Amino acid sequence: MFQLTRKYEFHAARKLTMLDVDHPCSQLHGHTFSVVLELSGEIDSSKGWVVDFYDIDKIYKDEIHALLDHKHLNDIEELSNPTTELIAKWIWNRIQPNLSGLTGVTVSEGPSYSCTYRGV
């Protein structure tokens, strides 16, 4: 069994709506978010890989990046309170049906903290 990872970034603004108004994250602010997709599987002997990174890139760019990059995340209906946890779950739900072998989605909003969602 092989474990693959592919890392992406997107830039977006948000405000966390479930916080007290004096909390800094309750105000509109932006992040450079990192997204790591984890996949596992066996090598396809006809191609020599588990999955083509090009295929992962196409799915990510069509299903995720175009909807999140340089956007106000609160404007996305399912992300009205766009915590890192809810962003990871939202990405999983959008990409998992089209990406066989997905085992985890990690979202970071900085270099020292992240959240990984591994599905239901």
Image (cartoon, grey):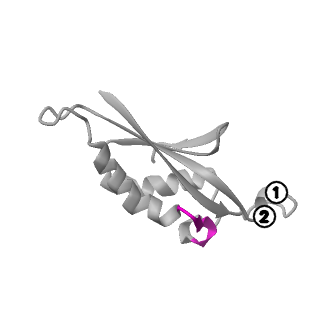
Q: From the viewer's perspective, tell me whether residue 13 is left or right of residue 10.
A: right
Asked if marks 1 and 2 touch (Cβ < 8 Å), the reply is yes
Rendered view: 54 above or below 71: above
**108 within the magenta span:** no
Residue lying farthest to the top in this orientation: 1
How packed is label 1: few (under 14 Cα within 10 Å), some, or many (20 or more)? Answer: few
Residue lying farthest to the right in this orientation: 22
Alpha carbon distance from label 1 to label 2: 6 Å
How packed is label 2: few (under 14 Cα within 10 Å), some, or many (20 or more)? Answer: some
Spot occupied by residue 20 in the image (x, y as percentages of width and height) = 83, 61
Kindly identify the residue that appears in the image at 60 percent across and 65 percent down: 73
Considering the numbered disc 1 on the image, is that residue within a helix, a strand or a loop?
helix
Considering the numbered disc 2 on the image, is that residue within a helix, a strand or a loop?
loop
Kindly identify the residue that appears in the image at 59 percent across and 43 percent down: 115
Q: From the viewer's perspective, tell me whether residue 41 is left or right of residue 34.
A: left
- Camera-nearest residue between 62 and 21: 62
* Image quarter in which the N terminus is found: top left
At label 2, the amino acid type is Gln
Rendered view: 85 above or below 26: above
At label 1, the amino acid type is Pro
The magenta region covers 69-75
- Camera-nearest residue between 47 and 83: 47
Kindly identify the residue that appears in the image at 33 percent across and 55 percent down: 58
Spot occupied by residue 116 in the image (x, y as percentages of width and height) = 54, 41
Rendered view: 73 above or below 52: below
Spot occupied by residue 55 in the image (x, y as percentages of width and height) = 29, 50
Which mark, by number, is residue 1?
none
Which mark, by number, is residue 27?
2
Determine which residue is flagged by label 1.
Answer: 24
